[in-house]
Amino acid sequence: MKQEESRQAQMNNYRAFGRRPGNRNMTVEKPQNGKKTLKRLMGYFVSEKKMLFLLMLAVVVVVACSVYAPKLQSNAIDAIAGRQWDKLSPILIVMVIIYIIHSICTYMQSKLSAVLSQNIVSRMRKDLFLNIVNLPIRYLDANSHGDIMSRMTNDIENISTTVSQSMSSLFSGILTVIGTVVMMVALCPQLAALSCVTVILTIVATKLLSKAMRFFFKKRQVILGQLNGNVEEMVTGYRTVVAYNRQNAVVNDFDNVSDELTRVGIIAEILGGSMGPVMNVVNNVGFVIIAAFGGYFAINNIISIGVISAFIVYARQFGRPIDELAQIYGQIQTAVAGAERVFEVMDEPLEDKSGKKNMDDLKGIIRFKNVNFSYTKEKQVLYDFNLEVKAGQKVALVGSTGSGKTTVVNLLMRFYDVDSGEILIDDVNIKDIDCDSLRRNTAIVLQDTVLFADSIENNLRYSNSSATDEQMYMAARMSNCDSMIRKMPQGYDTQLMSEGENISQGQRQLLSIARAFLAQPKILILDEATSSVDTRTEKHIQDAMVKLMKDRTSLIIAHRLSTIQDADLIVVMDEGRIAETGSHANLLAKKGKYYQLYMTQFAGCAT
């Protein structure tokens, strides 16, 4: 429902979108409370204990094969060099077996990682969505819808990617480093110590390049956001751009931002592309060290040629996990930060549905008694509001924007709870009424009609899924849209686009009225239902609403005073208070607030 009071939205879009997890150039977002979030995240892993155990077992086998294979290669080379053919055959057989096991377990590792990640994020996604649909309207009004969507999509996706790619890699990397060090020391402690030079160079180079890359990739994302914003503004406001001949100005602004993005992007890509060559240089330095000192040790019969070969493999194997572990750390931080944002929504208090009383047989008597309400502490919206609506009565709420009209409806639907005072329906406090029962007996027709990307039939049945076909057709006829629907290509099976964009505003409004008819409500709320249509369409909608309001307690919010002249009671609101009440004729005779509003609309002046 459209809020009439201006309130500052709490924007929580603090994400800095970098490259996808798994890329060394990603922008790292750090969590605020990493330990607590990580512990909570681990709770989802506990439910997948069997899958997690199998994954870790596969990782251990893969690492063991990777670490032991170079030793077998060393033995094979020494056997060939010594022409010990009788020893060579068993070594080769074992090597083949090792490689087969390694391949099978690598496949299983990949498969288990994918299954584990999808199972975990599936549970998180379901838990998050379940919480979102049960949040109070207050939260959704106060927070950016884009931010909520970002938590459901981007943050969940980051967690999924990290679990599938990083968790097993982290465990594998640690085991590989430990296993490689043990094997290198066992083969030749002196050469193992000299290989540490490569490790030091790798760490230094990675740290320096990563720092520079993070800066430029983050800057690129910021500029890209600006560019996307410019494009979005131009597309959504294109009519205004054309109307004021601002095409050249728009193009110049776009070119400036695009040029800056190009400049920063070139630097970022150069730095990103330099990591590989730099690492190759460092690795080559390591190979030179191993070859030089290994050759010296071999000449002096300290080690064999096979050991030198194994060391070359181990040196490469040792450097790769260290580089990956630095990347994985950043990925895990980003995933934990995303999980933290997801848990923030999950921890939001759910809508209060403590009321237990069923009101399916209600008459529709509504009383507001001394109601005070504010959306924020800084600005009160309703002041000591008192109003009585009799069963079957048609009551109109009028007033300037910000007077509190829509707030009255928000409170009646329990989208918000009053600060003080009470709202009674049939002398029962709405806090004691079951929310589902209250809303089942209430229908709303809004100014901004909400239709879903589905068939017309399913959109009509949204208010009453158990309605018969005849009831649906009757509701459509009563709302003056049956003939309109039957003229469409597929009739009631016609597919609507999101928000009903493939039909006119008037048609959308008539469908909304038909949906309200089908709900068979005891209380009806019409929130400026005709404010966005032309006069001719308004007449059709007005006729449909007259039928809809018959024998129902109706609250009408309207700016067009022509639509509420036959209301049983007109309530004029001003700054959260009732300024005056009465019929159309009585209020005109008083020459008060209503008279001023009427004359402003129909005479073009206020007297």
Image (cartoon, grey):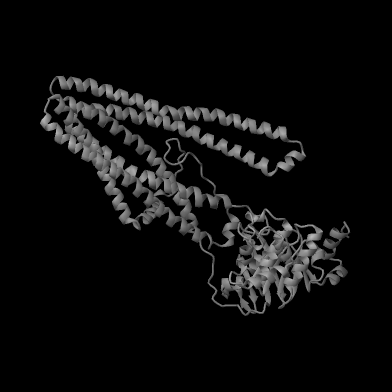
Q: Quadrant of residue 317?
A: top left
Q: Looking at the image, is 593 positioned above or below residue 89?
A: below
Q: Looking at the image, is 182 positioned above or below residue 270?
A: below
In the image, taking residue 215 as reference, residue 585 lies left or right, namely: right
Quarter of the N terminus within the rendering: bottom right
In the image, taking residue 298 as reference, residue 529 lies left or right, namely: right
In the image, taking residue 464 as reference, residue 29 lies left or right, namely: left
Residue 124 percent coordinates (x, y): 44, 56
- Is residue 388 shown to the viewer in this render? yes
Q: Residue at x 71, y 78 (%)?
A: 391
Quarter of the C terminus within the rendering: bottom right
- Is residue 396 shown to the viewer in this render? no
Q: Looking at the image, is 135 positioned above or below residue 361?
A: above
Residue 227 percent coordinates (x, y): 60, 37
Residue 344 percent coordinates (x, y): 48, 55
Name the residue nearer the viewer: 384 or 67: 67
Q: Residue at x 41, y 52 (%)?
A: 118
